Image (spheres, rainbow, N blue to C red):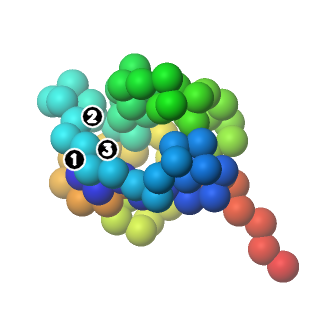
Amino acid sequence: MKLVYFARVREAMGSDGEEMEFPASVLTVGDAIDWLVAQSPRHAEAFADRSKLRFALDQRMVKSDAPVTGATEFAIFPPVTGG
């Protein structure tokens, strides 16, 4: 799956994204974040405060309980405000 990082998450990761293949045990966005946090200290730091993260699968906003099965892109970003 293509992971895409924006704003503060991109800065913390030092990259705008990466390719990852999640194990079969990763069923939801929340599972994916749990798995990513365990991958490296950089991931753990970038995703430490989940209350400050938002998610999109294939460019559609989702909550942490959304299933990741079938998605090709997973975006992770801080809350966004507009004017």
Q: CA distance from mark 3 to mark 2?
A: 6 Å
Q: Amino acid at mark 2?
A: Leu
53 left or right of 20? right
Kindly give the residue lying farthest to the bottom in the view shown: 83
What is the x, y in percent for residue 76?
50, 51
Q: CA distance from mark 1 to mark 2?
A: 7 Å
Count of numbered circles on the image? 3
Check the picture and name the quadrant holding the C terminus.
bottom right
Crowding at dot 1, Cα within 10 Å, few <14 / some 14-19 / many 20+, comes out as few
Q: Amino acid at mark 3?
A: Pro
- Answer whether residue 1 is visible to the viewer in this image: yes
* Up-down relation of residue 3 to residue 45 (above or below): below
Between 28 and 80, the one nearer to me in the picture: 80
Kindly give the residue lying farthest to the left in the view shown: 24
Question: Pointer 1: what residue?
Answer: 69
Kind of element beneath mark 2: loop
Q: Are marks 3 and 2 in contact (CB under 8 Å)?
A: yes
What is the x, y in percent for residue 63?
50, 46
Between 66 and 29, the one nearer to me in the picture: 29
Residue drawn 57% across the image and 36% down it? 46
Residue drawn 47% across the image and 53% down it? 15
Question: Pointer 3: what residue?
Answer: 67
First reached walking from the N terminus: tag 1 or tag 2? 2
Q: Are marks 1 and 2 in contact (CB under 8 Å)?
A: yes
Crowding at dot 3, Cα within 10 Å, few <14 / some 14-19 / many 20+, comes out as some
First reached walking from the N terminus: tag 3 or tag 2? 2
Kind of element beneath mark 3: loop
27 left or right of 11? left
Question: Pointer 2: what residue?
Answer: 27
Residue drawn 58% across the image and 29% down it? 45
Q: Amino acid at mark 1?
A: Thr
